Image: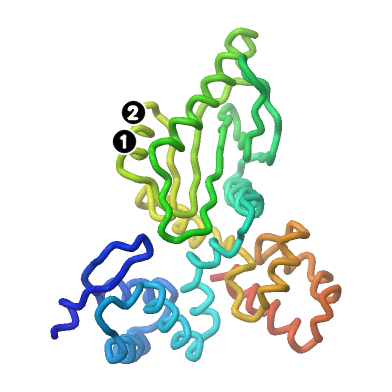
Amino acid sequence: MNISDLIITTASGEKARFSSNKVANSLRKSGADEADIRKILSVIKSELYEGITTKEIYNRAFKLLRKKDSLFASRYKLKNAIYELGPTGYPFERFVAAILENSGYNVEVGKIVQGICVPHEIDVIATIQNKKLFIECKFHGDHGRYCDVKIPLYIHSRFRDIENYFKAKKDPEEFFNEGWVVTNTRFTADATKYGKCVNLHLLSWDSPKGNSLKERIDRTGLYPITVSTLLSAREKQFLLSRDVVLCRELINDKFYLDHLGVSDIRKKKILTEMEKLCKS
């Protein structure tokens, strides 16, 4: 059988043809050179079988890349690292706030704002000059779960409730100029269509093109600590529980590694990895 005719299983459970180009492009974006990409692809192709999952392909590529360069492996696992921010959505909210703060916004997380009907807790409020953003973050721990049209419908109704309250008060300084929904997965076609119709900004892992969540992370170097290939799962959860979400935050708050009992040699390796990711 031709490799391009082999059927694989995606994260959502759908069937698709294997694409070596997709694997190569994801490796390329991590910084791997063409020679290493060819070698990794050669190994993966030799191990493929009908029905193999995209997760299995990813895991194999990650392990092979990690043997070559841990920095490239960390960047390659970015999408999975965002899932590791769970199980609660709060670290993801902090992460989104940090990306906007780095872009010049003043941010607030988890603020209660009155609506004309009921009060609302807003995940992130971001302000820059005369622009004020209402941002709701929808974190999914399941790779195959997308945001359907019910999500922007719900968020838009909350946005309008708050807007109507401040219109009634005639307090333009408190108006939100834009409503946003940010997710670590994707939006369905109907969700995207509704967002465009009511002018609700939708930011997902891979859209809008040129300014998606992934592209914003790569552009700013604001990688979550969960991309680390050196920290254990227990250590990552400890740091997240202390609101240490970004690699650059750990560099500034390295005393947490002492609290975890990390040896000096290992601490140096971890911090070096973090510094390289921030600079990359």
**Mark 2 crowdedness (10 Å alpha carbons): few <14, some 14-19, many ≥20:** few
Quarter holding residue 241? bottom right
**Mark 1 crowdedness (10 Å alpha carbons): few <14, some 14-19, many ≥20:** some
With respect to residue 278, does 192 lie above or below? above
With respect to residue 230, does 85 lie above or below? above
Q: Kindly identify the residue that appears in the image at 30 percent across and 70 percent down.
A: 9
Which part of the image, by quadrant, shows the N terminus?
A: bottom left
Q: Are marks 2 and 1 in contact (CB under 8 Å)?
A: yes
Residue 99 x, y percent position in the rendering: 58, 51
**Marks 2 and 1, Cα distance to the nearest angstrom?**
6 Å
Instruction: Label 1, secondary structure: give it.
Output: helix
Residue 95 x, y percent position in the rendering: 61, 53
Q: Kindly identify the residue that appears in the image at 25 percent across and 66 percent down.
A: 15
Residue 203 x, y percent position in the rendering: 45, 45
Identify the residue under disc 1.
193
With respect to residue 57, does 212 lie above or below? above
With respect to residue 95, does 202 lie above or below? above
Numbered tag placed on residue 197 in the rendering:
2
Instruction: Label 2, secondary structure: give it.
Output: helix
Q: How is the image coloured?
A: rainbow
Out of 146 and 279, give the one closest to the viewer: 146
Q: Kindly identify the residue that appears in the image at 47 percent across and 85 percent down.
A: 63
Q: Kindly identify the residue that appears in the image at 59 percent across and 21 percent down.
A: 162
- Left or right, 19 with reference to 162: left
Task: Report the amino acid beneath label 2.
Answer: Cys
